[in-house]
Amino acid sequence: MSDVDYSAMTDQELRCYFLEHREDQAAFYAYMDRRYANPNRQVFAIDDPAWQDKILAIIKAQSPPQK
């Protein structure tokens, strides 16, 4: 495995790299460290009428780009 500079990657690039190189444990730990350091939690009120639209927008934004 060649040396990869995970710190030079954006969050999205690191996520895509990890998904394509699942055997790379260093990539996994770099990704998890970054996720733990920068949690992106979303909170919704239980009576929010637009909760489904908000969740779908978050899922779409986090989906890897289509090839």
Image: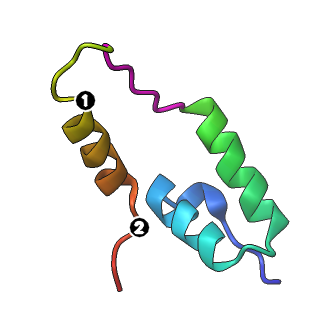
The disc placed on residue 64 is 2
Please name whichever residue, 39 or 30, is drawn nearer the observer in this view of the structure: 39
Q: Quadrant of residue 4?
A: bottom right
| Circle 2 Cα neighbour tier, 10 Å, few/some/many (<14 / 14–19 / ≥20) | few
Name the spot of residue 30 as percent of width and height, x first.
71, 52
Q: Give the side of residue 49 with respect to residue 46, left or right.
A: left
For the image shown, how many numbered marks are present on the structure?
2
Residue drawn at (25%, 13%), measured in percent from left and top?
A: 47
Amino acid type at image mark 1:
Trp
Secondary structure beneath disc 2? loop
Considering only vertical position in the picture, is 61 above or below 41? below
Considering only vertical position in the picture, is 27 above or below 30? below
Residue under pointer 1: 51
Query: Upstream in the sequence, badge 2 or badge 1?
Result: 1
Residue drawn at (20%, 40%), measured in percent from left and top?
A: 53
Instruction: Report if residue 65 lies within the magenta region.
Output: no
Considering only vertical position in the picture, is 33 above or below 43? below
Residue drawn at (74%, 59%), measured in percent from left and top?
A: 28
Secondary structure beneath disc 1? helix
Name the spot of residue 33 as percent of width and height, x first.
70, 42
Magenta region: 39-45
